[in-house]
Amino acid sequence: MDEASSCVSGAVSADVDRVHEHAVVGGCVFRARGLTKIYTMGEVEVPALRGIDLELAAGELVVLLGPSGSGKSTLLNILGGLDTPTSGEVWYLDHQLTGATEQDLTRFRREHVGFVFQFYNLIPSLTARENVAAVTEIAESPMRPEEALRMVGLGERLDHFPAQMSGGEQQRVAIARAIAKNPAVLLCDEPTGALDSQTGVVVLEALEKVNQTLGTLTVLITHNAGIADMANRVIRLSDGHIVDIRTNATKKAARELSW
Amino acid sequence: MRALDLKLFRDLWAMRGQVLAIAAVIMGGVATLVMSLSTYDSLVITRDRFYRDYRFADAFVNLKRAPESVAARLAAIPGVERVETRVRAGVKLEVEGFSDPITGLLFSLPEGAEPLLNTLHFKRGRWVQPDNADEVVVSDTFADAHRLNPGDKLSAIINGKRKALTIVGVAVSPEYVYQIAPGSMFPDFKRYGVLWMGRNALGAAYGMQGAFNNATVSLTPGTPVQDVIDRMDALLGTYGGTGAYARKDQFSNRFINEELNQLQITATIFPAIFLGVAAFLLNVVVGRLVALQREQIAILKAFGYSGLEIGGHYVKLVMLVVLLGVAGGVALGAWFGQGLSNVYMETTFRFPYLDYRLEAGVMLIALAVSAVAALSGTLFAVNRAIRLTPAEGMRAETPALYRATVFERIGLQRWLTQPTRMILRNIERRPVKSLLTVFGIACACGLMMVGNYQKGAIDFMVDVQFRQASREDLAVTFIEPTGSRALHELQAVPGIRHVEGFRDVPAILRFQHYSYRSAIYGIQPAGELHRSLNAALQPIRIPPDGVVLTDHLAREILHVKPGDLLTVEILEGSRPVRQVPVLGITKQYLGVSAYMQQDSLNALLREGNVVSGAYLGLDPGMESAVYAELHERPRVLGMIANAAAIKSFYATIGEFVLFYNMVASLLAGSIGFGVVYNSARLALSERGRELASLRVLGFTHGEIAYILLGELALLTLIAIPLGFLVGVGLCGILVLAFKNDLYRLPLIIEPSNYALGATVVVVSALVSGLLVWYRLGRLDLVAVLKTRE
Ligand SMILES: Nc1ncnc2c1ncn2[C@@H]1O[C@H](COP(=O)(O)OP(=O)(O)O)[C@@H](O)[C@H]1O
Ligand SMILES: [Mg+2]
């Protein structure tokens, strides 16, 4: 795979052994070419992405930075198979996502992707453990829900319902849910957006831990530049374009961040 | 258990009120379905078993008199399997301590053997002993009505001679499952009885030794019954045969079949309404649920659940509600069914036993029909869940679009407060849903009206029949047609105020290929007592030299109109066939008849001034004296007293009316409550935030309740008049569906019935309103404002 060579490879996780079996170490996991997305709302056309070229490597932690409306969520959703671009191509390893059927995309998400959203999106009628189980039940080789919850520091809150937990705790349940199936990719859309900075740090620590111990390629959206310091790479979006890609020489631990 | 299934149960539990309300509506539909079908099955199974075990005949005939040797010729008719000849005698009966006239029908039993056909099932006692002259078996209806048992005595006036009889058995016959005196409109177990005694004894008393005047035959399987009937008629014509008829025309059997037919109609119409309403309720409730759970659906899909898995999840949810409703409905339906079967057994049909059966097939039908209704109701919502793309589900739903309502656009806004505007806008924003809600509530009102319709309709029928058409206090029939001197003798009896003679004769009426077996009544053209009515229910004068037919007979059976020429085949004497013009149509709800002027009928029969009976008007208080006097007259065969018949009829139907009222109230209540409560809860779920915000702004509990419940109150008010229409429509369907020659229901709905329908709606609305009011009091203002929806 000669495309792999174009991936930035300085950001590979130290814990090589734990890297997901699908991922080539340091190899290219996602590759996007000329991605555009135009929403049509009646007469009006809203361009959300205007030509994105991008590679994401296994094990790295990437922060997508940009103002509100710059197209971050749209890009993330397309990478995760939740949405399809208007034009351009996306590859996941050697699978082309663009042009895949809904069935294929469903299988792709089921097997390889974990999502974390700003508003946690837990199922209110299920406990923490059951929320995680809802995903592990349909996964091939998942962790046990308890294990995933312990990783995010919620080993004691297994049987609490979402309504009985704080925002930060709910978000950590969401992370546990996302990682419990051992996904190759973890896509997080403003996971700290609804949290205060102190709680946000706890959530980011959980993500950091997952990235480091499991070697999961983690993409983290934020409009908060302070968070960018924990990334291997920072990709800045503005108005549907990538305006800058920066590799952090030294990345900070989540614990040291504040905003 | 799988996490998704846990979610299912918790979701159901969270909306348990609505789930129960919907299940109750499904339960109503299933209960009527199961009640009707199981009763239908039970009656059919019982009927068939009884007919088979007790050898119910295939064809029947009455004649004047034939020597016993003719039986062999009947048996020789191809296809005839068995022949039973009998002596059949109309008698007057006397039971000690009962002074009203009692008419009886006495049949002979073969000596020393069981009847070959139409044999008896004994409730108590035994057969008569061979060659015993005074032993008799009586029908159980008559025995029970008079508390008679083997060993008790009664007397019969046979051929003018009183004969003392001893009851040895109480029995049921397949020929008289439904018992009604000839010429009477309703069953009257006290004043009409069927009895059986030895052939020799009855033959001697009735002058029929070595002869018979009634024959029944059974046929070998596959024989066309009409062929046999034609041959029987050809054979028995010379013996005064009055025309053989098949089982399907046998009165008791026909009545059972009509009743079965009604059950089938009930099993169709009512469940359809209930399940339609349930489908609508599920539609809104599941639609709302899917809308509320968009984000949950989106996240599940984001994590790889497929559209089908999500759709299956909601289908499962719907099916659980259906299962709940069906289970309750089957239980309730079985209970209703048993109740209805018992009412039938006690009041109408005298089967020796009733096998109440709830077949598995009936339950499967109920489940299938409910499932189909429920799923078609939720198809749209479930499809929306399947089609929702995850990216879309993550975005908050756009705020609902409201606009100024018609009332405001036409300039009424000055008079509308803000809350009232909210009510109107909300109704107008969802016109279809509002309309369906109104219609659902209207159905509750309509169903209640149907449940109570019968009583009013029967009252009306009875009033028309007995206070406007047949106004006689007593109808007497003579043993045989007599000269008009008999009328003068009656006139002379103290207590008889007015006498109107009539001549009636059995006949087959034919027009083109249509025919009907009935009788022609020759009555007095300007009669005071027995009159014909026009469509406006005003008495009309029967014109001379032609026949006037009951509307149903003319239009639905014979397809004749005034001016057409009817062929009349007289079933008496030399059985002449004559052409008679149809001169008019009369309105009649009970039975069908053909009327002529008595003189014209006499002329048609080429006879003098001959009557077969008389209608009597009695002086008040003289009834018993007149009965006693007439009872002694040998020429008087039977007497039918209208007042007594009506009274006993009401006693009979009382149980039915009570039963149906109970069922209707229960079911209508469940629909009313189901619809109103669901709308209220739905409105609360959709607008809880909005209302909580208003509370935060300082609105009182009462004020926000007004916004929510005002909408429901308005819809309920609109629903009531619509409900009246639905009620009238449903009753109209019943009128059309239950139309037969035995009776036609009039489309008469009493004011009290409208009131009842409205009451059910208002009460269920009030109960739902109260429940919602209580919930509004517990709105958690902080929580509602904090959560993002
Ligand atoms: N479903 C949609 N329909 C129309 N426009 C949309 C839709 N989703 C996003 N957009 C528009 O696309 C642009 C990019 O949106 P998004 O990717 O959500 O930005 P970000 O996540 O960076 O805030 C915005 O202008 C937004 O309004
Ligand atoms: Mg975004």
Image (cartoon, rainbow, N blue to C red):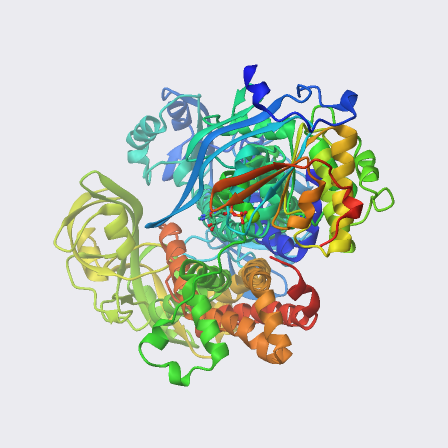
In the picture, the quarter occupied by the C terminus of chain A is bottom right
- Asked whether residue B632 is in view, the answer is no
- Looking at the picture, how far across and down is residue B190, in whole percent? 56, 59
Residue B381 vs residue B646, the one in the foreground: B381
Residue furthest out toward the right:
A156
- Looking at the picture, how far across and down is residue B549, in whole percent? 24, 56
Number of marks in the rendered image: 0
- Looking at the picture, how far across and down is residue B106, in whole percent? 51, 46
Q: Residue at x 60, y 65 (%)?
A: B688
Residue furthest out toward the left:
B563
- Asked whether residue B312 is in view, the answer is yes
- Looking at the picture, how far across and down is residue B521, in whole percent? 28, 57
Image vertical order of residue A205 relative to residue B647, above or below:
above
**For residue B21, what is the image quadrant?**
bottom right
Q: Residue at x 35, y 53 (%)?
A: B736
Residue B736 vs residue B54, the one in the foreground: B736
Q: Is residue B338 left or right of residue B479?
A: right
Q: Residue at x 80, y 41 (%)?
A: A152
Residue B24 vs residue B588, the one in the foreground: B24
